[in-house]
Amino acid sequence: MPRNPKRGGGAVKVLLIVLILLMIAATALVIWMCVDLTNRSKPAPTTPNNSLTVTLPRDTEPEPTETEPPETTLPEPERVVATATIASQGDLLMHKPVFDTCLQSDGSYNFESIFRYVKEYVSAYDYALANLETTFGGDQFKYQGNPEFNCPDALVDSVVEAGYDMLLTANNHAADTTAVGITRTVEKVREAGLAALGTQLNDEEPKYAVVDVNGIRIGMVCYTYGYSASNGSFSLNGLAPIKDVGQVNYFMNNNLDKLYTQVQQQMDAMKAEGAEATMMFIHWGTEYQLTENATQQQIAQKLCDMGFDVIVGGHPHVVEPVDLLESTVDPDHKTVVIYSMGNAVSNQRTGISNLFPTGYTEDGVLFTVTFEKYSDGTVYVAQTDVMPTWVNMSSVSGKKEYNILPLDDSRRDQWQSLYNLTDALFGSAEKSYDRTMSIVGEGLTKCQTWLEQAKADREAYYYDLALHPEKYPAETVPTEAFVEEPTAEAA
């Protein structure tokens, strides 16, 4: 039977239509994918500065970047920026037998032998001074010792060569060659390049000194007790009265209030000139007494209350104790004091007089104090020490000499070879050392212990202040009160 042509042709048409539609859809899909790929590959359009830019989140998170922690610097505490060690020595008591040993064959004088062994130490200190227990009155006065001291000028040259920087010129022998000697002594000391403290050329000159030592300004004052004073004249040693024109700093034991008034004025003046620490050098006490008397104690306490940091005494010709005083005005303030430094050189020897049977007049000290200045500008006494000295009288090449021997205990085993001592002289040096330390040892230890602890406390405070400044609020600076000026009617 023949097939139906119409029926078979309709199926084919339907199939063709479906295939065509599928091809159109596939073509459209391909075209859409190509267009989308092209759009993705194009760069993003730039946005004008004044337009708002919106950043869409990305499909992937950005890789984290490593950041270093900020460096932390600890604050630096206040520190020591300058130190100054001041060395003080006792009496250059120039008896005639002493300076006669310095006479040369040509008639000149050379005092080098006296300082030969101590020079090494004196020249090493930042600042050194000694008490000049004589005058340079010139050859118009007789060269002699007690009771009216006058010494050849050459002494001052050897003092300079030994390394001293200052001479204390206020003592009970300062006027032994009258007013002429007072003036000439100051002139000769200054001409040699040294400072003279305690006497001056006239009343207009300062009666103190402010000395800059390694950047630390130290105010210094020197006084001596007087024998008598009345009607505008004075005598220091029971000699003829001299008109008082303000050349000598002296006080009377029966009028200490006048001393305190003058010293307070000088303290104020030194502070006004920038003094950051203060020292008082004073000629006082009782000769040949191994302990201070009540007047010395009274004056020392008053000077401590005034604010002096160090007190250095002389005149007794023997060493007297060291002590640490506490102010009755400011309990935080303390003062280091040595009541007497003894003799640096003299002819007061055992066997010379019944006043010196025990050898104490042959003894002296190099008394040192060290000041420290911190970066905040404050200055403190940081250390103190005593080196005993002994006056050795011996024969060198057939000629007698007086030598100041520094008894440095760390070199005790070298004393004999350093100073050319016999066994007997070495034994005498050891006895001198023991005598001195028996007098100053206890007080020296007291001072050193307190100063060491004070420094430890100070530096602990500075360290804590740097780490925790909030614990230490700044001091309130008072402002001047406003006072309304009176009106004309009120006036």
Image: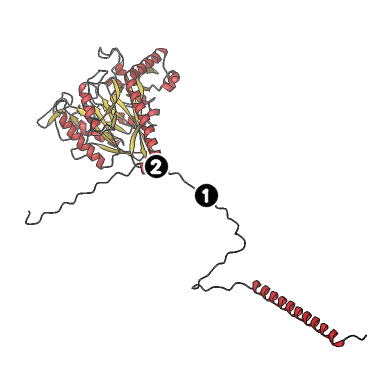
* Quadrant into which the N terminus falls: bottom right
In the depicted structure, whether residue 330 falls above or below residue 446: below
Residue beneath the point at 30% across and 44% down:
475
Q: Name the amino acid type tagged 1.
A: Pro
Q: Is residue 437 visible?
A: yes
**Mark 1 or mark 2, which has the lower sequence index?**
1
Count of numbered marks: 2
Front residue of 94/469: it is 469
Label placed on residue 61? none
Q: Position of residue 393 (x, y in %)?
A: 35, 18
Q: Distance between the residues labelled 1 and 2?
A: 23 Å
Amino acid under disc 2: His
Q: In which quarter of the image is residue 160?
A: top left
Dot label at residue 468: 2
Q: In this view, does 271 lie above or below 302?
A: below
Compare residues 47 and 450 and report the one nearer the observer.
47
Task: Give the labeled residue for mark 1.
Answer: 69
Residue in the picture at 58% in, 55% down = 65
Horizontal arrangement in the rendering, residue 46 relative to residue 31 (left or right): left
Residue under the point 50% across and 71% down: 52
The x and y percentages for residue 387 are: 36, 24
Q: Mark 1 Cα within 10 Å, few/some/many (few <14, many 20+)?
A: few
Q: Nearer the viewer, residue 432 or 30?
A: 30
The residue lying furthest to the bottom in this view is 6
